[in-house]
Amino acid sequence: MKLKIFLAIALVCFTVSSVAADSVYNSAPTFSSPYYAGELKSEVLNKALEELNYIRGLIGVPNNVTLNADYTSKAQHGAVLLDVIDTLTHTPSKPADMSDEFYNLAYDATTHGNLAVGKMYSSNGTVVGNMSLSQSLKSYMDDSDASNISRVGHRRWLMNPRMKQTGFGLSTRRGYAAAYVIEEGDVPSWLISDEFITWPTHKNAHPLTYFDSNTAWCVVLNEDVFEKSNTSSVHVTLTRLSDYKTWNFSTSNSDGDFYDNQQSYAYDECIIFRPDNATYKNGEEWRVEVSGLTRKNGASGNITYNVKFSSSATPYEGGKPSSQSYTRTEKKDDGAGCNTGFGFCVFSILILGIPRVKKFNRVGK
């Protein structure tokens, strides 16, 4: 089994306070022998699940994912193991005083999950706490830093139409988080009638909570409908309908970042683009046109869809307007560059394994 590590550095600004351990756990982890993974409160797990299903419903894939107790236990063990060794890796080493049972549960999670670590900083750069599960989900969906934008793999796993169950883990001591995303065994194919899914979504108004000028757009193609593209033939035109300003993307000439990733991060092909010098406003509409695609029946696979942005509150936020906004940095130092209008910053690093070639086959087989 080979694993390739991709690091994503995302700087996320929040007005929320730091994560208090007693507000997260029924029983807190222990980080020395005998190790104990701890138990997250059901309301913490359910809130993360609610947000995941909200994201999935937003893009039009099944939003009835449930928590699997076994996956959650493994994810919690995984988060604690990473905290113990203080290293973000899919193949963590075993501490000498850790039991095989604990380690094996944790290792299962690290080889089947999205992993993240993050710290919260005050405006003067002082560490005030560690990331929450909600913050880790937002980092996965952002996925737009220099290390991840070419594949947006974390995002694609959470958008996967085949996903049925998941589990979450969080170690608040250092802010390590895990989301179990690669289910055991073979799962049926696409499961939805749509030929493609997108981020930002074209199915509903897309909340600006999840998007800003640094966020990459993506179109994930239904591999049951489309042939894999000849990348050099793919062309994307992005049009802001308020003034009909356009951005064009291809391998030969792009008004921003452009990638056609054909690795199997839950899907076989994802077209990714990010316009230079673009900003997004409440109520503003954009049009996306993708050409150079071919359907399996030999017909043209050209795609056109519209996106409308919204600053309205999202349901999982309980009807309160969102106070979350994203800026990013490629530095691994402090909160420098955080929008000063926000009270706290979260600096997170994401890690993702290699794409799974055979959809959901167990890692290592």
Image (cartoon, rainbow, N blue to C red):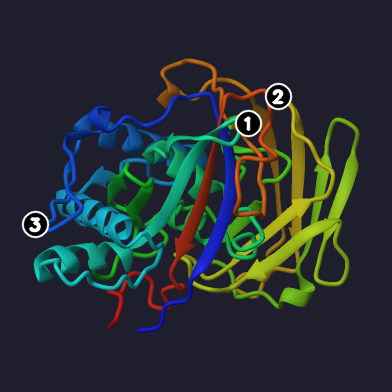
- Image quadrant where one finds the N terminus: bottom left
Query: For the residue marked with disc 3, what is the amino acid?
Result: Pro
Q: Is residue 148 left or right of residue 319?
A: right
Does 354 sit above or below residue 149?
below
Point out residue 95 in the picture as x, y percentages from the top left corner.
22, 69
Q: N-terminal of the two: label 1 or label 3?
A: 3
Q: x, y (%) of residue 223? A: 51, 68
Q: Nearer the viewer, mark 3 or mark 2?
A: 3
User: Residue at 60% across / 74% down in the picture?
Assistant: 227
Q: Position of residue 119 (x, y in %)?
A: 47, 42
- Residue 344 visible in the picture: yes
Disc 2 designates what residue? 282
Q: Quadrant of residue 235 in the image?
A: bottom right
Q: Taking 113 as reference, is 96 left or right?
A: left
- Mark 3, residue position: 34
| Residue drawn at (57%, 24%) of the image | 343
Q: Nearer the viewer, residue 190 or 32?
A: 32
How far apart marks 3 and 2 lie (CA) works out to: 52 Å
Residue 137 makes an appearance in the image: no
Residue type at mark 1 is Leu
Q: Find out whether the residues at labels 2 and 1 contact each other: C-beta distance under 8 Å.
A: yes
Judged from the image, the secondary structure of the residue bearing numbered disc 1 is: helix
Q: Residues within 10 Å of mark 1 (few under 14, many from 20)?
A: many
Report the residue at 40% width, 57% height from top.
115
What is the three-letter code of the residue carrying label 2? Answer: Asn
> 10 Å neighbourhood of mark 3: few (<14), some, or many (≥20)?
few
- Badge 2 element: loop
Label 1 to label 3, Cα distance in Å?
A: 45 Å
Q: Which mark is residue 287?
A: none
Element at label 3: loop
Classify 341 as above or below 83. Answer: above
Query: Looking at the rendered structure, which numbered label has been put on residue 208?
Result: 1
